[in-house]
Every structure is written in C-alpha cells, then in structure tokens.
Amino acid sequence: MAAGKEKSLQTYLEQAFGKSDVTSAKMRSALREWLDLYYGAPRPGEDPAPRLAALIVGKLCRTVFAEYDTRLDGQADTLLRGSLDALNAVRKTALQYALIGGECLLKPVLCGKTLDFVPIRRDCYTPLARDAHGRLLAVGTMECHSRGATRYALLERRVAGADGLTIETRLFELNGQALGRCVPLSTLEACADLVPQLLLPGVPGVGLAVLRTPLANCVDGSTDAVSIYAPAVGLLHALARCEQQLNTEFANGASRVFASEDLLRPDARGNRALRDDLFVGLPDDPANVGVTVYSPALREQSYLARKQDLLRGCESLLGLRRGILSETEAEAEPRTATEIAATAVDYDLTIRDLQAMWENAAREAMTLCGALGTLYGLTQAPADAGALSIDWGDGVLYDRSRVWAEQRELVADGLLRPELALAWYYGLPHETDADLRCIREHFMPKEEPHAGT
C-alpha cells in the first residue's frame, strides 16, 4: 500500500470511529521501508534489481514448509477439515506477508458450509489498541468498492471484549480523496447482509489469527512486530548502493572513441556523430590516425569483494546458513568445522522459530473455526474435537530415522511399550488407556492363537 493510501486508511478510521493508529510514526516509516525493499521501489543512488529482501523471504518460506504436513485428530467434521484445507492453501502467502511486515492477519470468511481464510498484509490494516504483549485488542480494516462511477469505502472495526467479539461496520461514499457521507449498508449488494454492529459471543480476541515474527523490536523498542530482515536493512541498502556503483563501473568502462570537434556533425535528430565518409583507407602510420579508442580497466573485483562481505554480514545478522546469500567458493579467511556447524545450527533454529510462529497461528485459526462454526450452527463437534497435528519433518539438529531406530531398540529390549513408540512416530495422543488401546487396534496386529497338538 502506498504512503498516501496508508494515510487515507488512518484518516478514514479516525473520522468513522474516532480512533487512531497506535503505531508510532517511526514504525510506520520502517514498515514502508520494508515494503519498498521487498517490492523493489526505486531509491536514489541504489539499484533495486537484486531484490535481496525477496530472496531472503522466499528462501525462508520454502524451507519452513519443505516437509510440512497436517492432520486433524479426534472427531473433526467437514467444517474443520475444509477450513484446514483453506488455511493450508494460503499458508505461503500469509507467511511471506508476515516475514515482510512483521505481522499478518488471517481473516476467516464464511464460504458455503466451511470457512475460507484471507491473509491481510500489515499495511492493509490499522492497529487501534494493543495489550502489553502486543496482542491486538482492536483493529480497523478498509475495503474499496465501486458501482459505476461511484466509489465506496467499507470500514470495519473489531474490538475484543469479555463477552466476545464486537464488529462495527460503516459504508461511506467517497468524495474524491475525502471520506464522504455515510450511506446504508444495503446500498451495495456485497454489503447487504452486514449489520452496523454485531456481537459474536464466544469468539476470542478480534476474531483473527495472527502471525508475528519472533524478533524483538529493533526499530522503536515497542511491542510491534518487525520484519524478518529488519536487523539487516542498513546492509540491504548498502548492497543496493554497491550494485549501483558496480553498474556505473561497467558503464564507465565501455570503450570510448576520441575525435576532434570538427569531425563531429549533427544528424537530423541532433545527435552528433562521425560521418561515414571519414572511414576510408587510413594509413598505417599512427601519426595520421585521427580517431583514438580508449578502454579503461575495470575494478569489479573490489566491488565484488565488498558485496560478498555485505552478504555474509546479512547472513550473520539474520541467522542464515553461510552460503544462502553469499558465494561459498569466494576467497575468504579460512573457517573451521565448528564455525560451519554453528552457522548451520543458527539457520536450523531460525527455521524452527518460524515454524513455531506458523503453528501457533494455525492452532489459533482452528480455534476460531470451531467457535464460529458453533455460533453459525455449522458444526456439532465438541470444543476439543479436531486437535491439529503438524509434522515439520527433520532438521539439522534432529534426525527422525536415528531417533526411530533408538525407539525400536528400546521396544525390542522391553524398555519401551510399542504403543508409545508408535504414538511418537505418528504424533498420536497417548495420555490415557483409551488412547493406547486405539493405537493397538489400528497399528498392532493381533496375535492368532496357536493350534493345539
């Protein structure tokens, strides 16, 4: 969202509900900078073509979901299973939005007999209130509609309360760039089913699942979430400047032709060039040559060395494995096996933090689905039905095949019950005797009685 549109959203919400954005001006400026870095907005003296921010976000997102798998345990019904499929369909978009802006909202939307999810980017909503931990207590959003030549703004304010979620909705007919008069919601067919104020009892928070990056705020020290590449913003700008300087170096290194002023003649467009009839059998004597070609030497090695140093700095600041951004084959100071292993461990821990971030948001989203489904009469399942299980696969610090082999050895030696080993392998509940009996019935073959002699 452009700065003008962001300002309009804040102004419109203030006029409609009398509430303003609680985000500091410094944080709003940082958010615009993160978005500019990701989307490659031009900046004087910088070349945005490399798009390092997009590279960082893309690599992290692919790694987080590389071995991702989900399932619902218990008595999950059609609503919960369909909602989980809808959530998984937007997981990569939502995670990338969160990595870019630090925070992303997942809005459940009724779609037939199930719930769909719409990711809301950080610059497309306005926090109106937060608690001491940064959790949203009130949030404002805006949707733009049009009918013919008339444009409308649908403003929504969500407020968390002890009795449930309160949603206030207003529809305005825009007057140019100003918020015009308030019109009935039935003015637009898309808003005809909405009501000015709605209380949803039993719906937690603001009715939105929240993705927040696991980083401390390095912008203004507040509880607002920050972009995954916020600590390296200065280095990303330095890389863009280095790239621009390298481009200039190659442009200045192009061959030049020096000729006397009297040999240049303007053409029909005003461009000055040498006439074709000047290039006729020149003698071999250099003293008689009227044109000199100059090709300056390039200094690309110094620029490339600086670029690799900046890239390695980004990897260190962001907890990425060495070589994710930089060239591992580039000449650098020798590194020990311990240093190599340490960077791999840092990267694994970074990925685990992001996976935990998504897992928390996914569980929050499924809780919302259960509450909304019960409220709308779409589900009869108990509150604890459809417990979500997420399998992330192996990582640098974790080898499932090795742990499974150890579990099997313990079972063979009689030191571990087979049901517990199977529960660990498949991520099944095993706290009660009923859980263990269910595992035996589904996975363990029954012993057939031996024939008598």
Image (tube, rainbow, N blue to C red):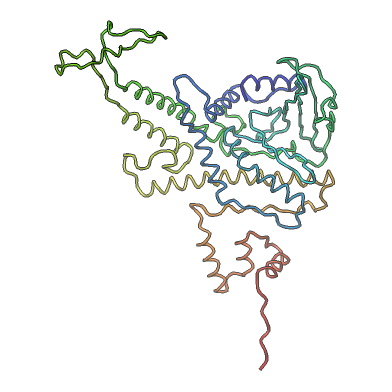
x, y percent for residue 452: 68, 91
x, y percent for residue 258: 26, 14
Q: How many numbered discs sit on the rendered protein? A: 0
Camera-side residue of 114 and 400: 114
Tell me the residue at 50%/37% (across/down): 56
Tell me the residue at 57%/29% (across/down): 221
x, y percent for residue 254: 32, 22
Q: Quadrant of the C terminus?
A: bottom right
Tell me which corner region of the image, top left, top right, bottom left or bottom right, holds residue 290.
top left
| Relative height, residue 209 to residue 221 (above, below) | below
Tell me which corner region of the image, top left, top right, bottom left or bottom right, holds residue 16.
top right
Tell me the residue at 67%/34% (across/down): 120
x, y percent for residue 185: 83, 26
Camera-side residue of 346 and 1: 1
- Relative horizontal placement of residue 23, taking residue 376 as reference (left or right): left
Tell me which corner region of the image, top left, top right, bottom left or bottom right, holds residue 128.
top right
- Relative horizontal placement of residue 338, taking residue 285 as reference (left or right): right
Instruction: Answer whether residue 17 is visible to the viewer in this image.
Output: no
Instruction: Answer whether residue 347 is visible to the viewer in this image.
Output: yes
| Relative height, residue 210 to residue 45 (above, below) | below
Q: Quadrant of the N terminus?
A: top right
| Relative height, residue 378 to residue 316 (above, below) | below
